[in-house]
C-alpha cells in the first residue's frame, strides 16, 4: 500500500468578503487540482483519493465545505445535510437551484485563483465535484485559470434532473474550450441520468464508445467494467451496474484511473511523464 500523505495536507483559510472555508493543501507536485467532497463531508475516502491524485503528480487542494472531517459512520450523512443547508453554504449552493447566481460561484472562483498561485499549472487547474458538488464544480468551467472539470454523479439541481444549473443556461457549456468529464453508474438512483445524457448535445459532439474491464455488473465495485465515451473535449464514463460514488466510497478502479488520465492529458505540461517519478 502506498505511503499515506495525509500529514502533508496543510490547512489554509480561503475566503471572500462573506464566506470562508478551510482548504487542505497537499505537497506541491505539479498542476493544481481542487477536489470538492460529497454530502457526507470530508471523509477518509476523499482524503485517500486526494493522496492518490497527488501521487499521480498533482498539487491537490481539498476544501472542507460542510459536514465532518474524516467522520464516516452513523450520522455522517445527516451532519452533511445539515451543513449543506446551513446559512453560508446555502448561499453558495443556491446556484444549483436558482440557475447559478453570481454570488454562488464567488468562493469557488476565489479558491481556483488561490490554487493557481500555489501550484505550477501552465495549462490551468482542475476542479473535481462529486454528488452535491458535481454540478457546483461546473461553476468554475468559464474561468480562464481552469483547464479541466470533472463532474461525478452530479445530483443537483435536485428538482431539475436535466439541468446542470449553469448561470445563463446550460448551452453556455458549448461555447468554451475547457475539457469536461462526467462519471456515473449506469443505475444510480441519486443522480439523474438525463443530466449526463444531454452533454453531447450541449457540446455538439459525437461520441465514440469503448469498453474496459469485466462485463458482469454484479461484480464488486472495484472489479467492475466501464464504458468510455469520448468526443471533442468531452469524456463520459459509465460504470457497470448500480451505485453512486464512482470515485470514492463505491469507487470503480478503472473509472478512477480514467479520471487521473483525463487530468494528466489536459493539465500536465508533459502528459507522457511518469506519475511515479514525482514521488
Image (cartoon, rainbow, N blue to C red):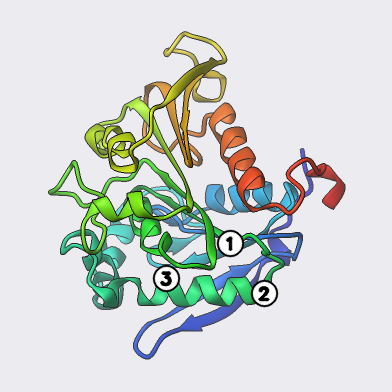
Q: Are marks 3 and 2 in contact (CB under 8 Å)?
A: no
Q: How many numbered tags mark residues here? A: 3
Kindly report which numbered mark, 1 or 3, lies closer to the viewer in this rendering: 1
Numbered label attached to residue 108? 3
**Dot 1: few (<14), some (14–19), or many (≥20) neighbours within 10 Å?**
many
Q: Which residue is mark 2?
A: 118
For image coordinates 38% across by 28% down, the residue present is: 206
- Badge 1 marks a residue whose secondary structure is strand
**Dot 2: few (<14), some (14–19), or many (≥20) neighbours within 10 Å?**
some
Label whose residue precedes the other's in the sequence (3 or 2): 3
- Badge 3 marks a residue whose secondary structure is helix
Q: Quadrant of residue 113?
A: bottom right
Q: Is residue 39 visible?
A: no
For image coordinates 41% across by 86% down, the residue present is: 16
Label whose residue precedes the other's in the sequence (1 or 3): 3
Numbered label attached to residue 125? 1
Image location of residue 110, percent across then percent down? 47, 77
For image coordinates 18% across by 49% down, the residue present is: 158
Front residue of 258 and 198: 198
Image location of residue 17, percent across then percent down? 37, 91
Amino acid at each position: 500500500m502506498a505511503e499515506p500523505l495525509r500529514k502533508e495536507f496543510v490547512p489554509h483559510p480561503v475566503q471572500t468578503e462573506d464566506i470562508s472555508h478551510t482548504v487542505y493543501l497537499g505537497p506541491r507536485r505539479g498542476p493544481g487540482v481542487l477536489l470538492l467532497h460529497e454530502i457526507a463531508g470530508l471523509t477518509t475516502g476523499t482524503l485517500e483519493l486526494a493522496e492518490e491524485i497527488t501521487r499521480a503528480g498533482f498539487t491537490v487542494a481539498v476544501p472542507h465545505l460542510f459536514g465532518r472531517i474524516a467522520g464516516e459512520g452513523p450520522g455522517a450523512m445527516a451532519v452533511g445535510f445539515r451543513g449543506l443547508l446551513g446559512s453560508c453554504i446555502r448561499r453558495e449552493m443556491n446556484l444549483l437551484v436558482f440557475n447559478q447566481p453570481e454570488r454562488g460561484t464567488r468562493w469557488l472562483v476565489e479558491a481556483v485563483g488561490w490554487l493557481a498561485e500555489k501550484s505550477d499549472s501552465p495549462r490551468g487547474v482542475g476542479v473535481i465535484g462529486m454528488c452535491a458538488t458535481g454540478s457546483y464544480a461546473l461553476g468554475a468551467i468559464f474561468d480562464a485559470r481552469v483547464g479541466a472539470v470533472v463532474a461525478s454523479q452530479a445530483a443537483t439541481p435536485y428538482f431539475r434532473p436535466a439541468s446542470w444549473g449553469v448561470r445563463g443556461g446550460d448551452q453556455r457549456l458549448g461555447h468554451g474550450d475547457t475539457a469536461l468529464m462526467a462519471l456515473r453508474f449506469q443505475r444510480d438512483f441519486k443522480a439523474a441520468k438525463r443530466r449526463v445524457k444531454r452533454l453531447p448535445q450541449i457540446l455538439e459532439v459525437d461520441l465514440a464508445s469503448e469498453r474496459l474491464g469485466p462485463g458482469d455488473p454484479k461484480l464488486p465495485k472495484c472489479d467492475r467494467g466501464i464504458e468510455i465515451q469520448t468526443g471533442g473535449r468531452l469524456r463520459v464514463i459509465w460504470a457497470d451496474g448500480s451505485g453512486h460514488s464512482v470515485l470514492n466510497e463505491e469507487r470503480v478502479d478503472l473509472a478512477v484511473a480514467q479520471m487521473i488520465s483525463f487530468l494528466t492529458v489536459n493539465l500536465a505540461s508533459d502528459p507522457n511523464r511518469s506519475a511515479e517519478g514525482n514521488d
